[in-house]
Amino acid sequence: MARVTKPGGTVAAAMWDIPGGGLQMLSHFWRAAREIDPSVADEQPRAGVREGDLVERFGRAGLQGVTGGTLETSVDYADFDDYWEPFTGAAGPATGAFYASLDDAGKATLRDTVRASLPEGPFTLPARAWLALGTVPG
C-alpha cells in the first residue's frame, strides 16, 4: 500500500484481533469446534492480528508518523439462528472449511455446542480490531 499511495497520502489498515479473543463471534465457534475435535486448528495466524503488529509493519514499510489504535464495536443478533446462519454458508476460510468437513451429525453437534455457550433471545457480542495509520514520505 505504501508503494502505490501518492507521496503525502495516508495508508490505513485494520485487522480483527482473532487470536486475542477480540472477535467473540469466532471465539464461540472455535471453542465448540475444539470440544468436538481437540486437534482442530482454528484461524491461521495472519499479518496484523496481534496488537502492535500493523504499526511495526507500517514502520518497516517506511511510512512516517505511524500511529496505532484499537477499534471496538459490537454486533447485535436477534437470536441464535441470526448468529448461526453465516456459518452454514461456509463464511470464512477456516470456519467454512471446518464446517463443510463435518457430516450432518457433526454439524448438529457443533451447532448445539455453540448454542449452549450463548444466551437465549437477542444478544450482543463485542468485537475488537487493531489499526494503524501512516503517511507516505514526500
Image: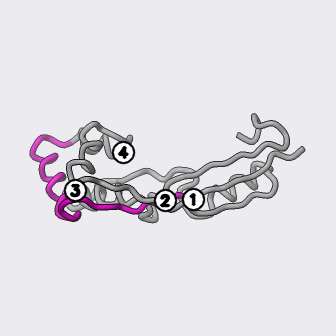
Does the magenta run of residues contain 112? yes
Residue 99 rendering spot, x and y as whole percentages = 25, 43
What residue sits right under mark 1 in the picture? 130
**In this rendering, the label closer to the viewer, 4 or 3:** 4
Q: Residue furthest right?
A: 138
User: Residue at the spot x=18%, y=58% of the render?
Assistant: 115
Residue 40 or residue 113, whichever sits in front: 113
What residue sits right under mark 2 in the picture? 17
| Marks 1 and 2 in Cβ contact (< 8 Å) | yes
Residue 72 rendering spot, x and y as whole percentages = 50, 62
Residue 101 rendering spot, x and y as whole percentages = 23, 40
**In this rendering, the label closer to the viewer, 1 or 3:** 1
Residue type at numbered disc 3 = Asp
What residue sits right under mark 3 in the picture? 37
Q: Which residues are magenta?
A: 102-130
**Mark 1 or 3 closer to N-term?**
3
